[in-house]
């Protein structure tokens, strides 16, 4: 059962919005020329070598271009370069004509490709993406347009690993601050970062200004959308507010099934959460069906693994741990916990109102089986820093943009403990390491898929994460804004072709 107070709270927010909007002008910012995009948080970095959070990833995709990208079916496609496999451990990439000019006017060449990946591979730089490309043994420049990659082992999926935005070699050598002053070759260039809440950019083909405005409070984002101070809001809005916006004549709401994987993570070095039986007891106590139906407005699908079932390496038989509070109580009792000696846990989350609400509901569900949860919410920067540093017992987060199975090495291999990857829970399992390594060198994609499905079953049984759901992508757009199209991974790429209609 879900706490009634938690469900009804958004009704007061909507009532407040209705009353407040009635006093506000609907066109307070009609003379603004820029396209303004409302975010729940600003990017952590604008350097693609270090971007791991969703917003940084999505914005750096606009500024930089990579050698390879993926289509909506998660298949590898050329972006900056075409490729050919000369041998199992030898790939040649040839740069094409598009996106070959950096925003400082210099030309993008194979030397920039080499410098970018050399900097990621340099352990001194501590790039979190190093683990995904450490099979690169050497890079050879054949000419300005051609570069060969020699690998330490065969890798049929290697092109899909080259998705880091390319930076100018000259500026890399000068230790340029790409974090705050990015220079790429993408369709949108950086203009200025006024403060942590406002990022200004310019679209190259028409000089259209684009602003990213961080507004932590979703109510404030919605009010500014209705007033015309921002034009688009994507994600991080409660289903009740989305439905309310959907009824507004001045707003268009678009929805699309997404692959954003939301989960509960654990510190496996902790004496309590490192216990597999405890993690299973927690999973059994969470009623995901009720949360998805009554809290998320059916805007999510239950998850049992990182990849959606329609991914080529997905495990369609896994839908997560079924709700069974009685079995949860039995596991807790066997572990020595009962009403007289309840299990007590610390649960970290961001201070985003909807994420905090979900954490409160999970807290209520765990309390019903005898688990007392202390929720600690923080601003995004503090929260994310704690998770990367391992300062947690239990937390909830989401993975966005999952396309390549190298995510398994990045998240679950024992060599990927931060800062060498994102194994934030400190999960160590020799079977998992071995299976990841075997799958990576398997030449047959069909056989690779079998290995990854087996791997996902092992992870499901071990539960270093509790899979919760795949969240839908939702965007609310003011009338007069055209061309914005939602993608499966929630990227912002279509801002390249979004425009204002002349009234």
Image: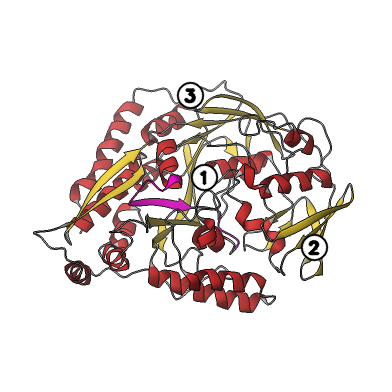
- Figure check: 484 above or below 487: above
Relative to residue 12, is residue 141 drawn left or right?
right
How far apart are the two marked residues, 1 and 2, measured between alpha carbons? 29 Å
Residue corresponding to mark 2: 91
Query: Image point 44% across, 36% down: which residue?
Result: 381
Residue under numbered circle 1: 53
Does the magenta segment cover residue 222? no
Tell me which residue sits at (52%, 45%) in the image: 53
Residue at image point 80% right, 63% down: 91
* Magenta extent: 389-404
Badge 2: residue crowd in 10 Å (few <14, some 14–19, many ≥20)? many
Location of residue 493 with respect to 276 vertically, above or below: above
Secondary element type, mark 1: loop
- Judge whether residue 502 can be spotted in this image: yes
Horizontal and vertical percent position of residue 486: 56, 50
Judged by depth in the image, the label closer to the viewer, 3 or 2, is 2
Q: Nearer the viewer, residue 346 or 485?
A: 346
**To which residue does mark 3 refer?**
27
Q: Secondary structure at mark 2?
A: strand
- Quick check: marks 3 and 2 in contact, CB under 8 Å? no
Q: Position of residue 304 (x, y in %)?
A: 42, 67
Q: Could you tell me which secondary element the residue under label 3 belongs to? A: loop
Which numbered mark, 3 or 1, is in the foreground of this view?
A: 1
* The one of 277 and 228 positioned closer to us in this rendering: 277
């Amino acid at each position: 059962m879900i706490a009634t107070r938690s469900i009804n709270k958004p009704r007061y927010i909507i009532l407040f919005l209705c009353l407040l909007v009635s006093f506000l002008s609907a066109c307070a910012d009609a003379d603004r020329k820029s396209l303004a995009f409302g975010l729940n948080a600003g990017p952590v970095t604008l350097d693609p070598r270090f971007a791991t959070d969703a917003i940084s990833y999505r914005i750096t995709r606009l500024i930089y271009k990579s050698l390879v990208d993926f289509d909506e079916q998660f298949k590898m496609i050329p972006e900056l370069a075409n490729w050919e496999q000369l041998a199992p451990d030898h790939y040649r990439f040839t740069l094409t004509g598009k996106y070959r000019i950096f925003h400082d006017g210099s030309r993008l060449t194979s030397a920039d490709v080499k410098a970018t990946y050399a900097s990621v591979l340099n352990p001194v730089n501590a790039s979190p993406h190093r683990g995904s490309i450490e099979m690169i043994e050497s890079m050879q420049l054949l000419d300005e347009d051609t570069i060969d990659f020699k690998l330490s082992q065969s890798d049929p999926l290697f092109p899909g690993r080259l998705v880091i935005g390319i930076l100018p070699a000259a500026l890399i050598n000068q230790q340029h601050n790409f974090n705050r002053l990015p220079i790429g070759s993408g369709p949108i260039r950086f203009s200025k970062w006024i403060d942590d809440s406002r990022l200004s950019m310019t679209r190259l083909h028409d000089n259209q200004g684009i602003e990213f405005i961080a507004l932590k409070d979703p109510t404030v984002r919605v009010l500014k959308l209705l007033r015309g101070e921002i034009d688009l809001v994507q994600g991080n809005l409660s289903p009740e507010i989305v439905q309310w916006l959907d009824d507004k004549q001045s707003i268009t709401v678009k929805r699309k099934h997404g692959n954003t994987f939301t989960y509960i993570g654990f510190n496996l070095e902790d004496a309590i959460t490192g216990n597999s039986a405890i993690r299973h007891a927690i999973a059994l106590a969470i009623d995901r069906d009720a949360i998805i139906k009554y809290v998320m407005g059916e805007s999510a699908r239950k998850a049992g693994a990182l990849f959606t079932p329609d991914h080529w390496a997905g495990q369609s038989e896994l839908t997560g741990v079924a709700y069974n509070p009685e079995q949860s109580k039995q596991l807790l009792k066997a572990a020595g916990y009962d009403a007289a000696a309840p299990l007590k846990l610390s649960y970290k989350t961001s201070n985003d109102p909807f994420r905090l609400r979900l954490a409160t509901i999970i807290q209520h569900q765990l309390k019903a089986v005898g688990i007392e949860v202390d929720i600690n919410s923080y601003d995004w920067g503090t929260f994310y820093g704690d998770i990367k540093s391992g300062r947690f017992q239990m937390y909830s987060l989401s993975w966005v943009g999952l396309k390549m199975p190298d995510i398994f090495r990045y998240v679950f291999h024992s060599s990927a403990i931060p800062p060498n990857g994102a194994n934030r829970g400190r999960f160590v399992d020799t079977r998992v390491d071995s299976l990841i390594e075997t799958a990576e060198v398997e030449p047959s994609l069909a056989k690779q898929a079998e290995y990854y499905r087996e791997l996902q079953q092992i992870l499901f049984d071990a539960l270093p994460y509790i899979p919760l759901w795949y969240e839908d992508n939702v965007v609310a757009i003011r009338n007069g804004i055209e061309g914005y199209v939602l993608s499966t991974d929630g990227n912002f790429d279509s801002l390249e072709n979004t425009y204002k209609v002349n009234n």
